Amino acid sequence: MPPNILPEHPFDHGERRVHDELLEEFPRTPERICQHIREYYAMISHLDFQIGRILDTLEERRLAQNTIVVLAGDNGLPSVSTASWENNVSTTTVSVCP
């Protein structure tokens, strides 16, 4: 297991058993964590493919030069990386501008 994968969050921030954290039993087993990682990467691959289709369609229709595309997402599944508080609050934003 990568060192940033923990069976539980390393400290109690007052909400250890809320939201997505309730989707899996505690402590998380290496087998279940590996399954979550596989599913997470599959979702990323699917999303990447779909975004590519959108960008290709904009190019085909000659709209890419007049279109701003903004993608924003959270850091992913809580069971994939729980090594630091920052991992649980960061947001990724990607902008494509003409």
Image (spheres, rainbow, N blue to C red):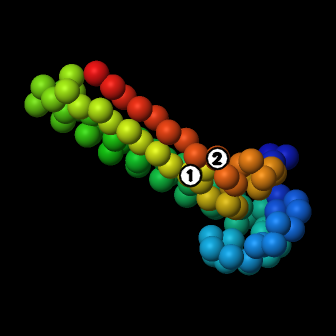
Q: Which residue lies at the image location 74% right of the left edge and 47% below the top edge?
A: 86
**Residue on which the image places disc 2:** 90
| Residue 5 in sight from this viewpoint | no
Instruction: Please indicate whether residue 49 sits to the left or right of residue 39 in the image.
Output: left
Instruction: Please indicate whether residue 31 sits to the left or right of residue 23 in the image.
Output: right
Q: Which mark is residue 74?
A: 1
Residues marked 1 and 2 touching at CB (< 8 Å): yes
| Residue 41 in sight from this viewpoint | yes
Residue 63, image x and y in percent?
15, 29
Q: CA distance from mark 1 to mark 2?
A: 7 Å
Rendered image quadrant of residue 82: bottom right
Amino acid type shown at disc 2? Ser
Q: Which residue lies at the image location 47% right of the left edge and 45% below the top edge?
A: 72
Q: Which residue lies at the image location 41% right of the left edge and 42% below the top edge?
A: 71
Q: Which mark is residue 38?
A: none
Amino acid type shown at disc 1? Asp
Instruction: Please indicate whether residue 17 sits to the left or right of residue 6 in the image.
Output: left
The residue carrying pointer 1 sits among few (fewer than 14), some (14 to 19) or many (20 or more) residues within 10 Å by Cα, namely few
Residue 53, image x and y in percent?
26, 39
Rendered image quadrant of residue 67: top left
Residue 13, image x and y in percent?
82, 66
Q: Which residue lies at the image location 88% right of the left edge and 60% below the top edge?
A: 10
Q: Quadrant of the C terminus?
A: top left
